[in-house]
Image (cartoon, coloured by chain):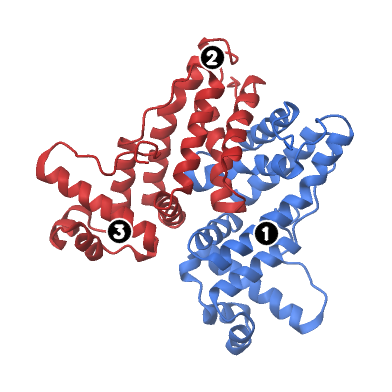
Chain colours: A blue, B red
């Protein structure tokens, strides 16, 4: 399960001694609290208790719930799993879509993403941290598209970031807006649609 | 501006006498409050004050902030503007994408949508009302796709709802998740991508 999760190893042993261990424990606890209670229920004292860490440590280092969420998103970006390399654009995009879908339907990560996105709608610092998270994640997967261009599967000048965004967009739309089911067929269709639109030249940068 | 807005006439004179006028004023005030303060700031007494209506009327009829948001979404669905009929699939989808984009970037409606979507992430009744709102809106635009199938622009068996969702998805993804700009070129690309994927048969229902 951990292997398959979108943003990887919250249980990973991290190098770097006590400071890193404290950060890891606190961010893990913050993620649990967000998934359970939502952003409105995120309380630094509660997170310290869950992490088994002194309150003052948490207040000194993260100061506010917003600061904690921003750091959690930074860690999620750092731990973003490496992209797939299946040898074909459709294979790579499908692997990406399935990973996003598994993450968003995961009993812990789904509510966690909803909580962070909800927090970002009313807090600029969180929105900024979220934007950086997606920028990192999109950059991680962009080479799938660049290689497809090199292989001649897609027209030259295709914007790789736009193709990667197109894969995620229908899944987030269902999670957050329309509420339609997020099954694997939906993920596969998102990958196929992005590949078809890219092949048709829709994402070629116009200069 | 009103003409162009996605979900239409919040200023419209509504038939039906005092009850309808009260509802209209209260929902208008609720929308203003949501846009300004977010869901967490939605307070029934404040909404009554803004609407110039007695508190007891508001408490009796809507009971909770959640009830108020659900009714606001019902009204937004009722007032959803009629779809475009440009004579071509791409023209229709582009009109739809531009309307969604104008709504989501509108200084009142953008924050209103963010507030409602954020509320839906942590409240099942609001999520349900939001789901019904999008179902109504998607059904309103589905005939654009049905007509394109009849005209032979798209393969038989194309799922019209899936194509309409595909147009909105990249715009909502930018608004809520990635934070990338929501310019008109993005809207046009969303329409073109949906049309290209549909033409490639991606949204044909597999039975």
Regarding residue A178, the answer to whether it shows in the image is no
**Which residue is labeled 1 in the image?**
A133
Q: Quadrant of the C terminus of chain B?
A: top right
Give percent across and percent down for residue B90: 56, 23
**Which residue is labeled 2 in the image?**
B149
Image-based side of B75 in relation to A81, left or right: left
Give percent across and percent down for residue A92: 79, 39
Tell me how far mark 3 sits from mark 1, CA to CA.
32 Å
Residue extending farthest top = B151
Please say if A184 is above or below A7: above
Dot 3, how many residues are within 10 Å of its Cα: few (below 14), some (14-19), or many (20+)? some
Q: Quadrant of the N terminus of chain B?
A: top left
- Depth-wise, is mark 2 or mark 3 nearer the camera? 2
Residue at 53% across, 46% down: A175
- Helix, strand or loop status at disc 3: helix
Residue extending farthest front = A207
The answer to whether the residue labelled 1 contacts the one labelled 2, judged by CB atoms less than 8 Å apart, is no
Quadrant for residue B143, please give it. Answer: top left
Q: Earlier in the sequence, mark 2 or mark 3?
A: 3
- Depth-wise, is mark 3 or mark 1 nearer the camera? 1
Tell me how far mark 1 sits from mark 2, CA to CA.
40 Å
Image-based side of A165 in relation to B49, left or right: right
- Helix, strand or loop status at disc 1: helix
Q: Chain of mark 1?
A: A
Please say if A62 is above or below B67: below
Q: Chain of mark 2?
A: B
Give percent across and percent down for residue B118: 45, 56
Residue at 62% across, 52% down: B178
- Helix, strand or loop status at disc 2: helix
**Which residue is labeled 3 in the image?**
B65
């Amino acid at each position: 399960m951990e292997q398959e999760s979108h943003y990887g190893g919250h249980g990973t042993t991290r190098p770097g001694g006590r400071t890193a261990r404290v950060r890891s424990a606190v961010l893990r606890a913050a993620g649990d609290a967000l998934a359970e209670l939502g952003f409105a229920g995120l309380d630094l004292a509660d997170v310290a208790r869950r992490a088994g860490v002194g309150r003052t440590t948490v207040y000194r280092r993260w100061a506010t719930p917003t600061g904690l969420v921003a750091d959690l998103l930074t860690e999620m970006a750092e731990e973003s799993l490496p992209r797939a390399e299946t040898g074909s654009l459709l294979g790579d995009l499908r692997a990406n879509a399935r990973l996003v879908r598994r993450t968003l339907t995961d009993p812990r990560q789904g509510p966690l993403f909803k909580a962070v996105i909800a927090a970002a709608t009313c807090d600029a610092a969180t929105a900024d941290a979220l934007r950086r998270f997606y920028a990192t994640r999109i950059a991680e997967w962009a080479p799938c598209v660049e290689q497809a261009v090199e292989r001649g599967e897609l027209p030259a000048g295709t914007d790789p970031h736009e193709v990667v965004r197109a894969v995620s967009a229908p899944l987030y739309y269902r999670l957050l807006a329309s509420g339609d089911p997020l099954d694997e067929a939906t993920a596969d269709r998102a990958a196929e649609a992005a590949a078809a639109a890219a092949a048709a030249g829709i994402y070629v940068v116009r200069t």
